[in-house]
């Protein structure tokens, strides 16, 4: 397999450094500001709100086109907060000019709002695709699907009544799309991520998140 030259695809060289043969192992750090819209669908109605937050991604190249990634995020607004942590490991390969990275992923999220605490976890798979549009601009997209487990809901009602329990979820799914643009020693990224996570048969968490950030490899 021939490595992609930096001149032909600077973005791919920066964002997937160790996914190309002939390059040294690298660690990639990404810092992002986020604007998140959250909807919680319940049997009696829908609650929604907007949050501002930040996201940190750290990817370690493992060699032979394998890499793992850790993502930590935090969002808050309108009296509520959403914190998430994710981990994935996958192997990249090329199909012509397109780079694909299927991966196994784990994700956990914690939602806290007045009278409500919710925790969910999921295990699944994802597929990322990267396509260079020019020497400095790359488009990317991803899809993911997984099964939720270890969901926990704690609800404080008016007065002393407190409800708490573990629930069975279902199939969670989502996707993202965006653009990477080479600036200086790194990459500016602008993207959008959608995720739908079932907590129980009548309780579903849906998020749409706009992201802007900067990524650098070292």
Image (spheres, helix red, strand yellow):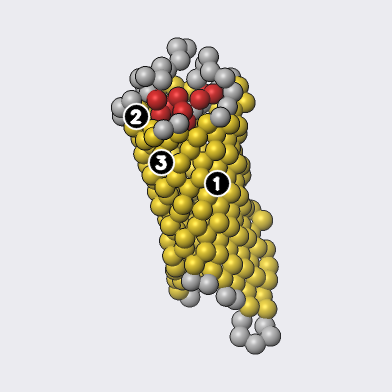
- Rounded to the nearest angstrom, the CA distance separating label 3 from label 2 is 12 Å
On screen, 88 above or below 9? Answer: below
**Marks 1 and 3, the one that precedes in the sequence:** 1
Residue occupying the far top of the picture: 2
**Marks 3 and 2, the one that precedes in the sequence:** 2
Residue 56: which numbered mark, if any?
1
On screen, 21 above or below 29? Answer: above
Read off the residue under disc 2. 136
Which residue sits at x=43%, y=57%? Answer: 35
Numbered disc total = 3
Looking at this view, is 95 or 28 the one in front? 28
- Label 3: state its secondary structure: strand
**Residue 96 location in percent, x, y?**
37, 19
Q: Residue 161, can we see it?
A: yes
- Label 2: state its secondary structure: loop
**Residue 65 location in percent, x, y?**
55, 23
Callout 3 crowding tier (Cα within 10 Å): few <14, some 14–19, many ≥20: many
Labels 1 & 3 near each other (Cβ < 8 A):
no
Which residue sits at x=61%, y=64%? Answer: 118
Q: Quadrant of residue 134?
A: top left
**Residue 192 location in percent, x, y?**
40, 48
**Marks 2 and 1, the one that precedes in the sequence:** 1
Read off the residue under disc 3. 189
**Residue 54 location in percent, x, y?**
51, 53
Which residue sits at x=45%, y=54%? Answer: 34
Left or right of 142 on screen, residue 73: right
Left or right of 150 on screen, residue 67: left
Callout 1 crowding tier (Cα within 10 Å): few <14, some 14–19, many ≥20: some
Which residue sits at x=69%, y=85%? Answer: 160
């Amino acid at each position: 397999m021939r490595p992609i030259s930096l001149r032909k695809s600077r973005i791919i060289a920066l964002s997937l450094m160790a996914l190309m043969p002939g390059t040294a192992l690298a660690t990639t750090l990404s810092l992002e500001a986020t604007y998140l819209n959250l909807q919680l669908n319940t049997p009696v109605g829908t609650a929604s709100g907007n949050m501002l937050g930040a996201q940190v991604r750290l990817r370690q190249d493992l060699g032979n086109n394998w890499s793992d990634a850790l993502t930590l995020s935090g969002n808050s607004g309108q009296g509520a907060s959403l914190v998430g942590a994710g981990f994935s490991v996958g192997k990249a390969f090329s199909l012509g000019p397109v780079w694909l990275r299927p991966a196994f992923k784990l994700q956990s999220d914690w939602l806290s709002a007045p009278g409500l605490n919710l925790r969910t976890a999921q295990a699944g798979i994802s597929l990322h695709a990267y396509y260079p549009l020019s020497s400095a601009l790359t488009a990317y997209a991803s899809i993911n699907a997984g099964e939720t487990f270890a969901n926990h809901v704690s609800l404080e009602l008016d007065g002393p009544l407190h409800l708490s329990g573990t629930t069975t979820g279902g199939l969670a799914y989502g996707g993202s799309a965006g653009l990477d643009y080479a600036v200086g020693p790194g990459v500016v990224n602008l993207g959008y991520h959608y995720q739908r996570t079932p907590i129980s048969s009548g309780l579903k968490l849906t998020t749409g998140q706009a992201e802007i950030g900067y990524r650098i490899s070292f």
